[in-house]
Image (cartoon, helix red, strand yellow):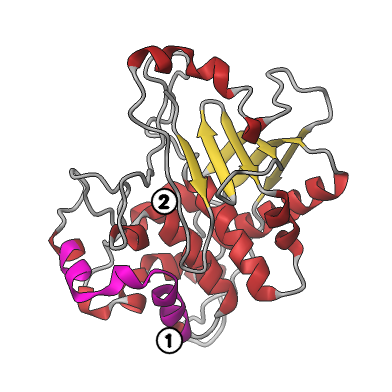
Amino acid sequence: MSAISYNSGGRGLARDGRLRGFPFLFSMIAPGLLTACPSFAGFDANPPPGSEWSASASREKPAPAPSSSGAGTASSVPPPAPAGAIAALFYQPSVAHQELYKAGLVKVLNLFASDALRERVVKSASLTAPKLRVDSGWLPTATMTQCRLPADKVAESVLSHHFGPINYFDNPVPGANATTDICPDRTSVDPDRIDQFESCDGASQADALNTLAHELTHLVREAPTCDCSRVPPCSSRFLDRDRDNCTEGWLVSYRLGDTVECHLNHPKDDKAFGACMRKLRPGAYTEACLKRIQDTKLCK
């Protein structure tokens, strides 16, 4: 069956569990049941015209690097990484919440496209845990067969991804801030959380955008072209079931969400950024945890 995630976002209190261990028979009938799941109330396999929305990330044009003569030349500027995009459909009782969703998603997309965030993703380990001595601490899953994913591969997989179409809802999610299902792509966020997407309190807004970024990672599929009608159906490349206090802080879903939050709170101060990351997931930075991460093999 397709996995469902539940996330409560940053502040070091995140809980993201997935339904698992159901019998094979349930996996056969679950897709029909999930369309009626309270988290996705209002889902329509054939949404009405006008419910679609899309956006592409906008990148700031980099300044030309100085040439040896001191004059800038366009040829001396490395080509930017591809910018991501998103297509979405909204099932909202409130036009205001649709606009908040759109504003939050555009903020996250533009952050994903920024060189500053990409650099922090690539240098994440050295900025948060210098003793680890590698920038390959990202875990795609927390299972016993886990491996470490190089940070540049995370950037390549997520930051330039074209998401969607994603069906977005604003239904309450019991015990969590958000939930995501990958077949079909659906994310529901608690209405109170949506209100934070445009909060005047910068820290509150960053906390909520952590959740949006986290949920987007679950919508990167294991195979680019997969069939949701097969059994088992498509799966997310980045899962976080069976995590513990150590692995949680290194999982792609949590770590990227935390990176977005801490980058927004400390855009220029690397030291404060690292402290923010450690505060959100203190269990990820104990000596024992860092050794576990260091000893985990690199993904092939």
Give 81 or 40, whichever is nearer the viewer.
40
Main secondary structure found in the magenta portion: helix
Kind of element beneath mark 2: helix
Please give the name of the residue rendered at 17% of the width and 70% of the height, measured from the top-left corner.
288
Q: Give the extent of the magenta segment.
A: 272-292
Farthest residue in the front direction? Answer: 175
Residue under pointer 1: 271
Q: Is residue 280 magenta?
A: yes
Give 176 or 125, whichever is nearer the viewer.
176
Q: Position of residue 151 (x, y in %)?
A: 34, 60
Identify whether 186 is placed above or below 157. above
Identify whether 137 is placed above or below 162. below
Residue under pointer 2: 156
* Crowdedness near tag 2: few (<14), some (14–19) or many (≥20) residues, C-alpha within 10 Å: few
Please give the name of the residue rendered at 47% of the width and 63% of the height, measured from the top-left corner.
13
Give 100 or 12, whichever is nearer the viewer.
12
Q: Position of residue 234 (x, y in %)?
A: 42, 25
Q: CA distance from mark 2 to mark 1?
A: 25 Å
Comes first in the chain, label 2 or label 1: 2
User: Which quarter of the figure has residue 41?
Assistant: top right
Please give the name of the residue rendered at 56% of the width and 60% of the height, measured from the top-left corner.
210
Closer to the camera: disc 2 or disc 1?
A: 1
Question: What amino acid type is highlighted by mark number 1?
Answer: Lys
On screen, residue 106 versus residue 179, left or right, reads: right
Identify whether 292 is placed above or below 109. below
Q: Position of residue 156 (x, y in %)?
A: 41, 51
Question: What amino acid type is highlighted by mark number 2?
Answer: Glu
Disc number at residue 247? Answer: none
In the rendered image, which quarter contains the C terminus? top left
Please give the name of the residue rendered at 59% of the width and 73% of the height, measured from the top-left corner.
264
On screen, residue 51 versus residue 60, left or right, reads: right
On screen, residue 220 versus residue 152, left or right, reads: right
